[in-house]
């Protein structure tokens, strides 16, 4: 017996979809679950059913990239960053991330809207470049500071940074390779590090090796939305479970994608999720 297929019918729906509702993954339970809109059939106080959702029913069939949203601005960016756009069923969409003077990503700019997107794509913003420094001459044993010259303006107090030292080189005393620290103090000349947010300056000792030392900020994150959504709440075309609440949650509809698919043939149900 098939686990599922991309044809909208009871026999091709996800066999184990009922398992989350204390039902055995049998053909009979699967068929009853398919297209169900009967109250209390699977969960008391809710109607739950499994639906095959194509891109038209989902609400997007030929969308373009329209909006970039920053979810975390990152830190330590000295220049704009590349953005990798993938998934969503579309093609040619492209964007870039704009850094500001404080080392954050301030905007995600869409450079090519692309075409034929069915869902919001995934984006990855490139990490900030590591800031290198001379660990012998730039580290003050008395003031416990690190001089990063002009690059240090990209770090602000409270930023989390990762210290790295090249293989075979000696780490700065007081900190360890591959470990994250917090910027405790920053001005146009120097920074200090702390082990915890808001903590005391770490007692630093200059390394005997000059090169191969760096500090790197955190990578920014974001999302890109596409046009054409009908706001039905379906995250992806494919096999989805639809839940409708009752009582205090009356009328609230939630979709959970069991199997995401780029295409779904057939149209066994056209009332709950109509094509038009």
Image (cartoon, grey):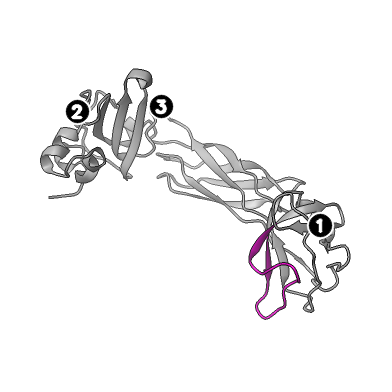
The C terminus sits in image quarter = top left
Count the marks: how many?
3
Residue in view at x 76 percent, y 49 percent: 156
Question: Horizontal placement of 69 versus 175: left or right?
Answer: left
Mark nearer the viewer, 2 or 3: 2
User: Percent position (x, y) of residue 102?
Assistant: 76, 46
Instruction: Give residue 41's mark.
Output: 2
Q: Can residue 276 be seen in this snapshot?
A: no
Q: Residues within 10 Å of mark 1 (few under 14, many from 20)?
A: many
Residue in view at x 16 percent, y 50 percent: 2
Q: Secondary structure at mark 3?
A: loop
The magenta stretch spans residue 212: no
The Cα–Cα distance between marks 2 and 3, rounded to whole angstroms, is 28 Å
Mark nearer the viewer, 1 or 3: 1
Q: Secondary structure at mark 2?
A: loop
User: Percent position (x, y) of residue 68?
Assistant: 57, 39
Q: Which residue is mark 3?
A: 230
Question: Horizontal placement of 90 versus 268: left or right?
Answer: right
The Cα–Cα distance between marks 2 and 1, rounded to whole angstroms, is 62 Å
The magenta stretch spans residue 163: yes
Q: Point out the stretch of residues depicted in magenta.
A: 162-181
Instruction: Give residue 191's mark.
Output: 1
Question: Horizontal placement of 261 versus 225: left or right?
Answer: left
Going from N to C along the chain, the mark reached first, 2 or 1, is 2
């Amino acid at each position: 017996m098939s686990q599922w297929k991309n044809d909208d019918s009871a026999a091709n729906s996800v066999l184990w979809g009922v398992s989350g509702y204390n039902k055995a993954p049998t053909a009979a339970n699967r068929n009853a679950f398919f297209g169900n809109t009967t109250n209390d059939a699977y969960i008391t106080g809710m109607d739950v059913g499994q639906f095959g959702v194509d891109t038209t029913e989902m609400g997007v069939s030929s969308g373009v990239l329209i909006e970039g949203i920053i979810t975390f601005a990152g830190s330590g960016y000295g220049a704009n960053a590349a953005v990798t756009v993938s998934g969503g069923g579309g093609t040619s969409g492209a964007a870039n991330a704009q850094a500001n003077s404080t080392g954050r990503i301030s905007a995600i700019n869409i450079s090519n809207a692309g075409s034929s997107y069915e869902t919001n794509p995934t984006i990855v913003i490139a990490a900030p470049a590591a800031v290198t420094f001379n660990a012998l001459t730039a580290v003050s044993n008395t003031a416990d500071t690190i001089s990063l010259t002009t690059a240090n303006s990209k770090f602000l107090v409270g930023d989390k940074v990762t210290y790295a030292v090249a293989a075979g080189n000696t780490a700065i005393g007081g900190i360890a390779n591959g470990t994250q620290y917090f910027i405790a103090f920053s001005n146009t000349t120097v920074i200090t590090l702390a082990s915890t947010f808001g903590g005391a300056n770490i007692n630093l000792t200059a390394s005997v090796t000059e090169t191969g030392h760096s500090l790197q900020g955190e990578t920014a994150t974001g999302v890109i939305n596409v046009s054409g959504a009908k706001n039905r709440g379906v995250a992806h075309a494919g096999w989805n479970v639809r839940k409708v609440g009752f009582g205090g949650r009356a009328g609230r509809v939630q979709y959970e994608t069991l199997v995401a698919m780029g295409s779904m043939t057939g149209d066994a149900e056209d009332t709950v999720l109509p094509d038009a």
